[in-house]
Amino acid sequence: MNMKRQNFIRLTLSYLVILAMFIVILYPLAWIIGSSFNPGQSLSGSSIIPKNATLAHYKELFDLGESDYLRWYWNSLKISIVTMLLTVMTVSLTAYAFSRYRFIGRKNGLLTFLILQMIPNFAALIAIFILARETNLLDTHLGLILVYVGGQIPMNTWLMKGYLDTIPKELDESAKIDGAGHFRIFFQIVMPLAKPIIAVVALFSFTSPFADFIIASVLLRTESKYTLAVGLYEMVAKQFGAEFTTFAAGAVLIAVPIAILFLSFQRYFVSGLTAGGTKG
């Protein structure tokens, strides 16, 4: 009986902790969603279930005559998608080289990546700004993409290398015996088995630039080139036009592409390592 009672108490405490975590996580989300339906522009009196709920703020965001929200949304999507594709390609090649080959400077290169991933991009904002200005990449999406891709490489290379190290090298050797070259092994043997970590890298490299504010606010100067984070900040930073409820509506819509990407990649997160890896 004492054992059953202890198990019951432990299980109850576990559920209480989980419930508390859900409340802490979901309450701000529910509040911002409720605020987006709140009439007026002030957040005073906002609640999870607003009275006289309205879709006016969402309509305002999609009104091209009143808001540049759709343009900012497209800018963020474009920058994030290109960053994701370039990051996955460069990180896959870099991690594969560090995982499968032995060359001079390999250990020092890995150590350099380890040190670089400890330093966030915004810690080098002045250097990034000067470099972008000197290379005529200031106030351009290309410059922003290059900064994002460069910042993603160190951490994700370590992440993917650790995963590739767990893929048996015997598969590579078997493919070499069958006459496969390095690129064929990379594309047809290793990468199909690395889909789970590729999905993780893709998700990280998409969400980071999509939600970034600091670097984008430093490099972008023209309002038509703003990303969502910078544009929404400017919306509430105006001296005489703080549109807080419209900001809330715009913030809610930010989650849509991230949720779609996560749901699309979800099956790779739980897939087996060697699925389809046996040689027939």
Image (cartoon, grey):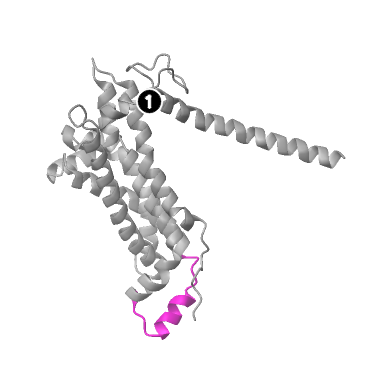
Quadrant hosting residue 67? top left
Q: Secondary structure at mark 1?
A: helix
Give the extent of the magenta segment: 165-182
Instruction: From the viewer's perspective, tell me whether residue 106 is left or right of residue 140.
Output: right
Give the image location of residue 101, x and y in percent: 38, 70
Give the image location of residue 52, x and y in percent: 40, 18
Residue 240 colored in magenta in the image: no
Instruction: From the viewer's perspective, tell me whether residue 205 is left or right of residue 14.
Output: left
Residue at 83%, 42% in the rendered image:
3
Give the image location of residue 12, x and y in percent: 71, 35
Quadrant hosting residue 137? top left
Give the image location of residue 115, x and y in percent: 38, 49
Dividing the image into 4 quarters, which one contains the N terminus? Answer: top right
Instruction: From the viewer's perspective, tell me whether residue 159 is left or right of residue 124.
Output: right
Residue at 76%, 35% in the rendered image:
9
210 in relation to 65, above or below = below
Residue 181 colored in magenta in the image: yes
Between 133 and 40, the residue placed more toward the observer is: 40
Quadrant hosting residue 235? top left
In the image, what residue type sits under mark 1? Answer: Ser
Other residues around mark 1 within 10 Å, as few (<14) / some (14–19) / many (≥20)? many
126 in relation to 116, above or below = above
- Taking the view exactly as shown, the residue that stands out farthest to the right is 1
Between 152 and 200, the residue placed more toward the observer is: 200
Residue at 19%, 47% in the rendered image:
142
- Tally the numbered discs: 1
88 in relation to 184, above or below = above
- The residue indicated by pointer 1 is 36
Q: Is residue 119 visible?
A: no
